[in-house]
Image (cartoon, rainbow, N blue to C red):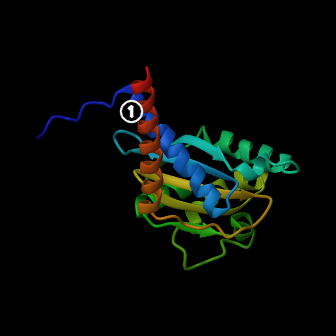
Amino acid sequence: AAPPAPAPAPAAKLCAAAALRYAAQSVLDRGGGDFAIFWAPSVTNALLSFQFCVLSRGVHAAGAEDRYVLASMYGARSAALTFPQGVGLPGAVWASRLPFYSEDLVAAAREGGGCASCPLLPTALLRVNEREACDVRSTLVQPFGRGVLEVGTVRRAALLVTVSDAAIWGLVKAHADRHHAAVARAARSA
């Protein structure tokens, strides 16, 4: 067996994390969500854990303070969670590699589970209390590179748009290219 690849340098990890945040923000800008949470697998792929939560620019607008507080609270509550493959909505999407969308997951839970044709819905209902407390409505969870991206709205139902892996990685590459060009310019002028 080949030896394991060396760990990336701290600067490379930082650049990759910044690129993922940029891509998540771009997904929000294109898809209409209020927050995006990135879940990534552990080194052993045993658990999916919270990596970061990004809020849309819309929840920072005047008059949207309640959405900002609720989206932040949902992100903070999510930070303490981990999901094994197939458990919870992020874990189910991670295991199946199939996206999940619900215009109003809380209402679906109140109606007894809603869509019988959706195999991921029962596991989606595990966090319904957190969603209800934070008034999370529309929820889109999709495979995102090596992990899972959860996008949602607060206090409003909205059609959330899936973004293909190719488009997401195109955004990451564009961000990385701009970053590396800026570093090269700075080095030349120093």
68 on left or right of 185: right
Residue 110 visible in the picture:
yes
Image quadrant assignment for residue 121 = bottom right
Q: Quadrant of the C terminus?
A: top left
Q: Residue at x 61, y 43 (%)?
A: 53
- Vertical relation: 53 (above or below) 151: above
Query: What amino acid type should be assigned to the residue bearing mark 1?
Result: Ala
Q: Among all residues in the image, which is located at the extreme left?
A: 1
> Where's residue 180, x and y in %?
41, 37
Q: Residue at x 73, y 42 (%)?
A: 73
Q: Position of residue 46 (x, y in %)?
A: 39, 44
Q: Picture coordinates of residue 31 (x, y %)?
A: 62, 63
Secondary structure under badge 1? helix
What residue is disc 1 on? 12
**In the depicted view, which residue is nearer to us: 120 or 61?**
61
Would you place residue 167 above or below residue 71 in this image?
below
Q: 55 above or below 141?
A: above
Q: Position of residue 106 (x, y in %)?
A: 73, 63
Q: Residue furthest toward the front?
A: 189
> Which quadrant of the figure contains the N terminus?
top left
| Residue at the (69%, 50%) spot, across then down | 56
Q: Toward the viewer: 92 or 69?
A: 69
Instruction: Answer whether residue 48 is visible to the viewer in this image.
Output: no
